[in-house]
Image (spheres, rainbow, N blue to C red):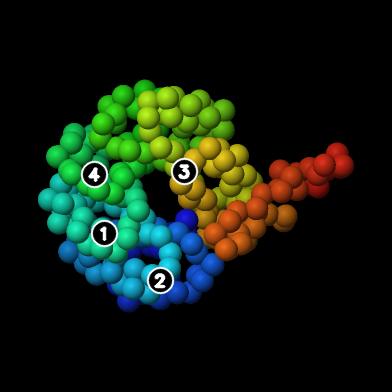
């Protein structure tokens, strides 16, 4: 995914056009009435890409219910973290044809049970769950409970993206555009190409010959 920060509808449409290689665009939304126009503007600017929206806990049941018809007509495929942490019970009131994914509401395995039946997927961020080993454990437990998986990221260099690349192999949704937001990155770094991420051995500091690249 390629993420657009919340802005005016016209500016978000421009940002969507500026990143031509994107195949999935995630829109940060705010919960205000302008969200509808933001979604429409980006959808009209890039009709060939899939869309995801991320509320960052900013919706209410009423605002989400009002927005859903716009999301459906704009081909939005995923709604991320609509309600604040601790208010997940509101998801039981929503009849959304679009899958909902929990982000801030899930940090570790013990959070899964209260999300069962309320969301369809969880966003695994290695920064918040404790690293790659714990992330793989969380993924295993979540899949066993019927959740789809998404891997996300905080800001960081390619060395932070690389473990996410590993867990992304078992996820339906991959949101690892962190390096695109860095002013500088380590060399060599991960490569982004037409919606695909390439993460060769050199990113980790070694190559198949056994010689260090760091």
Expressed as whole percent of the image width and height from the top left, the position of residue 56 reads 31, 49
Label of residue 46 in the image:
2
Among the 4 quarters of the image, the one containing residue 182: bottom right
Q: Earlier in the sequence, mark 3 or mark 4?
A: 4
Q: Earlier in the sequence, mark 2 or mark 1?
A: 2
Q: Residue at left 18%, top 44%?
A: 95
Q: Is residue 138 left or right of residue 57?
A: right
The crowd level at tag 1 (other Cα within 10 Å; few <14, some 14-19, many 20+) is many
| Label 3 vs label 4, nearer the camera | 3
- The picture quadrant where one finds residue 111 is top left
Say whether marks 2 and 4 touch (CB < 8 Å). no
> Do the residues bearing badges 1 and 4 touch, measured as CB atoms within 8 Å?
no
Q: Residues within 10 Å of mark 2 (few under 14, many from 20)?
A: many
Of callouts 1 and 3, the N-terminal one:
1
Residue 207: x %, y % from top left = 81, 44
Residue 85, placed above or below residue 179: above
Q: Is residue 163 rendered to the left or right of residue 137?
A: right
Dot 2: element: loop
Q: Secondary structure at mark 1?
A: helix
Q: Residue at the location (63% across, 50% down)? A: 158
Distance between the Cα atoms at labels 3 and 2? 22 Å
Which residue position is annotated with label 1?
Answer: 71
CA distance separating discs 1 and 4: 16 Å
**Front one among 10 and 171:** 171
Where disc 3 sits, the SS reads: loop
Q: Which mark is residue 172?
A: 3
**Residue 19 appears anywhere in the view:** yes
Mark 3 vs 2, N-terminal side? 2
Q: Horizontal and vertical percent for residue 131? A: 54, 33
Question: Which residue, given by chain and number where applicable, does mark 4 sit on?
Answer: 83
């Amino acid at each position: 995914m390629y993420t657009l920060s919340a802005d005016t509808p016209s500016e978000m449409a421009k940002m969507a056009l500026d990143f031509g290689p994107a195949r999935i665009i995630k829109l940060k939304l705010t919960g205000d009435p302008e969200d509808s126009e933001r979604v429409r503007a980006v959808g009209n600017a890039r009709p060939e890409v899939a869309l995801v929206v991320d509320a960052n806990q900013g919706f209410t049941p009423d605002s989400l219910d009002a927005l859903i018809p716009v999301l459906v007509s704009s081909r939005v495929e995923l709604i991320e973290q609509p309600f604040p942490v601790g208010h997940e019970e509101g998801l039981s009131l929503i009849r959304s044809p679009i899958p909902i994914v929990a982000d801030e509401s899930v940090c570790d395995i013990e959070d899964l049970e209260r999300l069962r039946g309320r969301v369809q997927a969880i966003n695994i961020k290695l920064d918040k769950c404790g690293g790659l080993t714990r992330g793989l454990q969380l993924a295993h437990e979540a899949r066993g409970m019927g959740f789809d998986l998404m891997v996300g990221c905080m800001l960081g260099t390619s060395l932070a993206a690389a473990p996410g690349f590993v867990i992304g192999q078992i996820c339906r949704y991959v949101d690892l555009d962190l390096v695109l937001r860095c002013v500088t990155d380590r060399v060599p770094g991960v490569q982004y190409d037409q919606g695909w991420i390439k993460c060769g051995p050199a990113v980790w500091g070694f190559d198949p010959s056994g010689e260090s690249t760091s």
